[in-house]
Amino acid sequence: MTPDAEGFEHLAAEAIDALPDPFAAAARAVIIQVVDWPSDEMLEALDIDHPLDLTGLYEGIPLTEKSSLDQPLTPDMIWLFREPILAEWRDRGDIDLADLVRHVLVHELAHHFGWSDDDIALVDRWWE
């Protein structure tokens, strides 16, 4: 059975709980928002043509760029896009859905920690 948004939130919470302590504490400060699809505005801002091409998105100021003097206008947030994740899971057919949700979440958390896509690629060969 395919999990609904609440089921995805549960998978994300389990993934955060499994992180090493320093990362888990910082990850718990980020709001996780699960929706079926990215908005048109998100896709346009990222120059993405098809909504299935975006499984997750970090919105916020990376920890490496924050200052104690800054007053955030919005909380740091990670969006998990349920339908694109489910489509990738079905297409792959060889991985557990919880593993894929964890991977997408950890990738977005890496942006929160201040890692670039190139930095992430050095330690995470998932997409190869």
Image (tube, grey):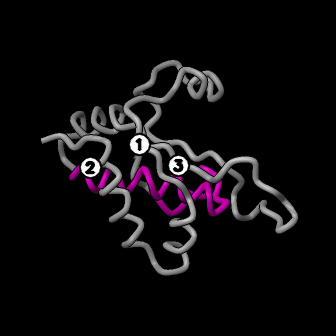
Point out residue 105 in the picture as x, y percentages from the top left corner.
44, 54
> Residue at the spot x=60%, y=49% of the render?
117
Dot 3: element: strand
Say which amino acid is labelled 1: Val
Labels 3 & 2 near each other (Cβ < 8 A): no
Residue furthest out toward the left: 1
Specify few, some or many for label 1: CA neighbours under 10 Å numbering under 14, 14-19, or 20 or more: many
Question: Mark 2 highlights which residue?
Answer: 7
Question: Mark 3 highlights which residue?
Answer: 78
Specify few, some or many for label 3: CA neighbours under 10 Å numbering under 14, 14-19, or 20 or more: many
Say which amino acid is labelled 2: Gly
Specify few, some or many for label 2: CA neighbours under 10 Å numbering under 14, 14-19, or 20 or more: few
User: Which range is magenta?
Assistant: 96-124
Image check: 114 left or right of 126?
right
Q: Earlier in the sequence, mark 2 or mark 1?
A: 2
Instruction: Give how far apart the Cα atoms at labels 1 and 3 are.
Output: 8 Å
Dominant SS in magenta: helix
Q: Earlier in the sequence, mark 1 or mark 3?
A: 1
Question: Mark 1 highlights which residue?
Answer: 34
Image check: 78 left or right of 13?
right
Disc count in the image?
A: 3
Q: Earlier in the sequence, mark 3 or mark 2?
A: 2
Image check: 15 left or right of 112?
left
In the rendered view of the protein, which quadrant contains the N terminus? top left
Dot 1: element: strand
Q: Nearer the viewer, mark 3 or mark 2?
A: 2
Instruction: Give how far apart the Cα atoms at labels 3 and 2 are.
Output: 16 Å
Which of the 4 image quarters holds residue 41?
A: top right
> Residue at the spot x=84%, y=59% of the render?
70
Magenta residue check for 91:
no
